[in-house]
Image (cartoon, rainbow, N blue to C red):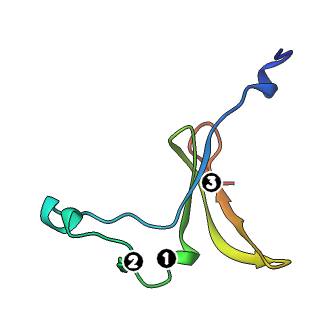
Amino acid sequence: MINSFEELPVKIEFVLGKKIMNLYEIDDLCAKRIISLLPESEKNIEIRVNGALTGYGELVEVDDKLGVEIHSWLSGNNNVK
């Protein structure tokens, strides 16, 4: 049971990159195929909460695990913190 607004579950996504492809290119995808991303994509991670852009960060490694270091965070009125 959820007792307060702050306990509501939300989906958080860390987007490494986006690419537009035509249907022919998508149909041609298979295992081990490499899809190129923009240079330094790992430094421009979009952070989305329930689909809404809420910040930017950088992919980092901490104790042999991947993580995202937040560089900027958008407040409720889209101001950067």
Q: CA distance from mark 2 to mark 1?
A: 7 Å
Q: Residue at x 83, y 14 (%)?
A: 1
Front-lying residue, 75 or 2: 2
Q: CA distance from mark 3 to mark 1?
A: 20 Å
Foreground mark, 2 or 3? 2
Q: Amino acid at mark 1?
A: Ser
8 left or right of 48 in image: right
Which residue ends up furthest to the front in the rendered image? 31
User: Callout 3: few (<14), some (14-19), or many (20+) C-alpha neighbours within 10 Å?
Assistant: few
Looking at the picture, how far across and down is residue 53, in whole percent?
52, 48
Residue receiving disc 1: 41
- Tally of numbered discs: 3
Asked if residue 13 shows in the view, the reply is: yes
Q: What secondary structure is found at the residue carrying circle 2? A: loop
Q: Residue at x 44, y 67 (%)?
A: 17
Looking at the picture, how far across and down is residue 7, in whole percent?
81, 26
Q: CA distance from mark 2 to mark 3?
A: 26 Å
Q: What secondary structure is found at the residue carrying circle 1? A: helix
Residue 19 against residue 77 in the figure, above or below = below
Looking at the picture, how far across and down is residue 24, in whole percent?
13, 65
Q: Amino acid at mark 3?
A: Val
Label 3 with label 1: CB-CB less than 8 Å: no
Q: What secondary structure is found at the residue carrying circle 3? A: loop
52 left or right of 8 in image: left
Residue receiving disc 2: 37
Of labels 2 and 3, earlier in sequence is 2
Front-lying residue, 43 or 14: 14
Which residue ends up furthest to the left in the rendered image? 24
Residue receiving disc 3: 80
Residue 53 against residue 50 in the figure, above or below = below
